[in-house]
């Protein structure tokens, strides 16, 4: 983007929002920590008033994209929000637009299905060895608490095998949202641990066989299909 680009002034345009968008694009076009300019230099180059620029800057500060430094060497510096801030923003969206438990289940299940399918394409020998070792330890997990520990370890290993930041963030947020959502009683694993283990064995075996389609199929029938079946049984 040209450093001399000014803020568009179309009829009906919110000038503060338009100024924030131009600054946002400048920030993303440069490395974090880069000086974007001083208050007066930016107001002059964007052809907006000081008050408009200050209001736009506050918007970007709230988004975690701008840092205002005062004193010698001061000015407006580009920044990046941390992962926690991004996750909080997405979580807030889910809560502003509430959904049903089954829709939350759909979100988490679809993400998990795609995660295991993508993990089947991992060629990192060390990560594949870790997955194989985790599969071998699965039989030692024999309680709900232990299974929860296994699931966390399995999920984190899948994130390492896939390495897709946006995918990871969406998965983490939807899992957190679904876990905090008031759900109906599910006759889940208390009496069905062996079936659950068998499902996890099939998923991991498909990943280790580099069969993404099979991994997705096994994940679907071992997660959403199984839980929906329990939900319907409880009704």
Image (cartoon, rainbow, N blue to C red):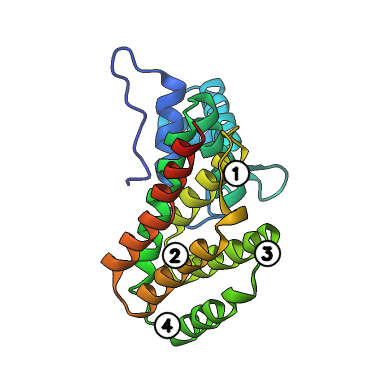
Q: Is residue 63 left or right of residue 74?
A: left
Give the image quarter of residue 202.
Answer: bottom left
User: Which callout, 2 or 3, points at the residue further toward the start of the chain?
Assistant: 3
Distance in Å between CA atoms under marks 1 and 3: 30 Å
Q: Mark 2 vs mark 1: which is more N-terminal?
A: 1
Q: Nearer the viewer, mark 1 or mark 3?
A: 3
Select label 1 or label 4 by which is in front. Answer: 4
Mark 1 lies on residue: 85
Task: Give the residue at x 37% y 55%.
Answer: 221
**Image position of 184 (left or right of 15):** right
Q: Position of residue 158 (x, y in %)?
A: 48, 67
- Residue that badge 4 annotates: 124
Name the N-terminal-most of marks 1 and 4. Answer: 1
**Residue underneath mark 3:** 146
Dot placed on the residue nearer the N-terminal end, 4 or 2: 4
- Per the image, the residue denoted by label 2 is 199
- Residue at left 54%, top 47%? 175
Against 48, residue 79 (above or below) is below
Q: Which mark is residue 222?
A: none
């Amino acid at each position: 983007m040209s450093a001399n680009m000014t803020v568009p002034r179309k009829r009906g345009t919110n000038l503060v929002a338009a100024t924030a968008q131009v600054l946002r694009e400048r920030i993303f076009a440069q490395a974090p920590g880069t000086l974007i300019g001083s208050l007066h230099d930016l107001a002059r180059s964007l052809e907006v008033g000081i008050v408009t620029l200050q209001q736009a800057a506050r918007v970007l500060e709230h988004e975690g994209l701008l840092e205002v430094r005062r004193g010698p060497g001061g000015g407006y510096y580009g920044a990046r929000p941390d992962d926690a801030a991004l996750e909080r923003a997405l979580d807030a969206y889910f809560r502003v637009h509430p959904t049903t438990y089954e829709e939350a289940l759909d979100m988490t299940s679809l993400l998990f299905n795609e995660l295991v399918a993508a993990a089947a394409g991992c060629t990192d020998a060390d990560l594949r060895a870790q997955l194989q070792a985790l599969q071998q330890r699965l039989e030692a997990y024999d309680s709900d608490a232990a299974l929860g520990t296994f699931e966390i370890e399995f999920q984190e290993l899948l994130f390492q095998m896939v390495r897709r930041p946006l995918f990871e963030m969406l998965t983490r947020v939807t899992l957190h949202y679904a876990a905090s959502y008031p759900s109906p009683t599910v006759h889940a694993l208390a009496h069905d641990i062996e079936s659950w283990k068998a499902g996890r064995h099939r998923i991991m075996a498909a990943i280790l066989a580099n069969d993404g389609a099979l991994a997705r199929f096994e994940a679907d029938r071992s997660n959403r299909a199984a839980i929906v079946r329990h939900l319907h049984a409880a009704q």
